[in-house]
Amino acid sequence: MVRDCLSEEILLARPLLSSTQGDLTALLKEVKKLLEELVVPVKGILSDGEETIRSAVAFVFPDVPHQLCQFHYLKDATKLLYEADRNAKTHLKKHLRGVRPIERAVEEYRTPENEAIRGYCLAVRASLTDDGRSPLQPSGLKLHDRITQVRDSIARVQEKNRQGKGAD
């Protein structure tokens, strides 16, 4: 698919049997011809970093600046960080197993305390399934931040309870 980045209009979309340089060159030549007929200048080209795309663009548009998509560039640049974050998330998830049995245990007796515990369990489960979008929102760090918020909230409640019991 070839699309105008400013208007987001699709210029040409076609299923290709392969992504060889020859197939991509033919596609880009067709787009170039269409744009020339419409008298629309090509000021720049943005794509992912596949070598076949780079070669086809260089062949069809030799004098047009071509840059790597920022998302793909960041994704490639943060590949090692992504792997570390993914491993950290896996490790965190192992420590958070067992939330569902706690929820089942507190569901039997409806008390304000049990409802609070159930709320914390829901927050933990929601945190486990809420993935960030790599590379700008690493899911492991996001999970760590949310679990830290839950832990801090529980600590504040425990501190208030201790203070309240000491006043009697």
Image: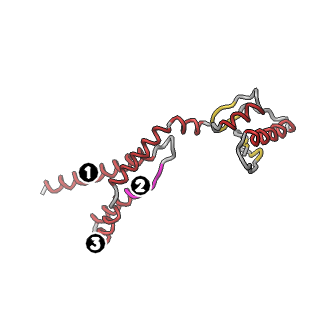
| CA distance separating discs 2 and 3 | 26 Å
Residue 28 figure quarter: top right
The amino acid marked with disc number 1 is Ala
Q: Percent x, y for residue 105? A: 29, 69
> What is the crowding at mark 3: few (fewer than 14 residues within 10 Å), some, or many (at least 20)?
few
The amino acid marked with disc number 3 is Tyr
- Residue under label 1: 155
Residue 46 figure quarter: top right
The amino acid marked with disc number 2 is Leu
Q: Report the front residue among 148 and 36.
A: 36
Numbered tag placed on residue 75 in the rendering: none
Instruction: Look at the numbered disc 2 and give the secondary structure of its residue.
Output: helix
| CA distance separating discs 1 and 2 | 20 Å
Q: Percent x, y for residue 43? A: 74, 31
| CA distance separating discs 1 and 3 | 23 Å
Q: Is residue 128 magenta?
A: yes
Q: Report the front residue among 119 and 41.
A: 41
Q: Percent x, y for residue 13? A: 75, 48
Q: Residue at x 63, y 36 (%)?
A: 49
Q: Earlier in the sequence, mark 1 or mark 3?
A: 3
- Residue under label 3: 109
Residue 100 lies left or right of residue 64; in this view the side is left
- Residue under label 2: 128
Q: Are marks 1 and 2 in contact (CB under 8 Å)?
A: no
Q: Quadrant of the C terminus?
A: bottom left
Q: Earlier in the sequence, mark 2 or mark 3?
A: 3
Q: Earlier in the sequence, mark 1 or mark 2?
A: 2
Single out the mark in the foreground, 2 or 3: 2
Which residue range is magenta in the image?
Answer: 124-131
Magenta stretch, main secondary structure, is: helix
Instruction: Look at the numbered disc 3 and give the secondary structure of its residue.
Output: loop
